[in-house]
Image (tube, rainbow, N blue to C red):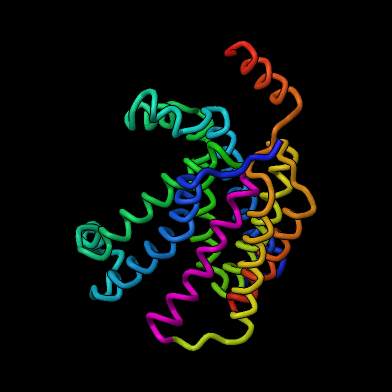
Amino acid sequence: MTGPLAATGMIAAIVLASTAGEVLIAAAMKSLGDLDDIRAHSGLLGAIRAVLTSPLFFAGVFFLALAFFSLLFALNHLNLSLVGPAAASLTVITNSIAAKFFLRENVDRRRWTAAALICVGVYLLAH
Amino acid sequence: MSHRLKPDQYLVLLAVMICAPLGDSCLKRGMALLPSISLTHPGALIAAVFTRWIALGIALLIGFFASYLAALSWADLTFVLPATAFGNVVIELISFFWLHEHISWQRWLGVFLITAAVGFVAQGPSLTTHPDQHKASISSATEAL
């Protein structure tokens, strides 16, 4: 029997790992610049090489893999109807917070409203 | 400084919205056609990768990831997030129109809220420009002239 504290910990692990992965990959892409420009100068292989030689990209993929295995572990102990919507909707909020503080994105009222609407919308879709 | 998207960038966002749910649907359809796979026979999972629907699903998911990376290279994460969430709406529409599944009013409300969120964000700029970046772009444009 999984208690509420353990369930919270499992969902938090998915959300935190997923957020770290998304933010690191976004930071990697921002540091590379517009991929369309790189492709125009160096071709498709040049664009792929630019992505695959970015340490931030691999750090992001590592955390996304961690989030995936955390999800598998959580699904082994908890119901999908709890883990799916909780992780998906909370990740939207934590991504917005992380984007504001780590990527210095301008998360204005419009984007906060969108994040809240998505959070509620994803929750409703699971029911 | 407003960052409006070019038509081909809208196509990339469209690919982000469509490729993931279509890829997941193909994987679901492909796995449903296969007999039950046991973890004691992992080779069956490798063989599944080469079946038509699973291969198509994997190709679509690779397309999603490539489009997602491209979008993040010219747009903010908080701008691209609603596009990825719109994949949930596409799944609901596929369920309703293609699989003829019943969709409850709560799920239609969820579809409406996510669609509204995409509309909200699409009205705004796609990329945050900091004052130092703005000055740098002006000086480089001046030098180019």
The image position of residue A74, as x and y in percent, is: 55, 63
Where B101 sits versus B88, above or below?
A: below
Q: Nearer the viewer, residue B4 or B27?
A: B4
- Quarter residue B128 falls in: top right
Q: Nearer the viewer, residue A87 or A121?
A: A121
Q: Nearer the viewer, residue B42 or B25?
A: B25
Type of secondary structure dominating the magenta stretch = helix
Q: Residue at x 70, y 52 (%)?
A: A94
Inspect the magenta stretch and tell me whether residue B116 lies in it.
no
Q: Residue at x 70, y 66 (%)?
A: A117
The image position of residue B108, as x and y in percent, is: 60, 80
Which residue is farthest top?
Answer: B143
Q: Residue at x 53, y 85 (%)?
A: B103
The image position of residue B56, as x and y in percent, is: 27, 60
**Where are the magenta residues, as a range?**
B76-100
Where B27 sits versus A13, above or below?
A: below
User: Do we see residue B22 in this rendering?
Assistant: yes
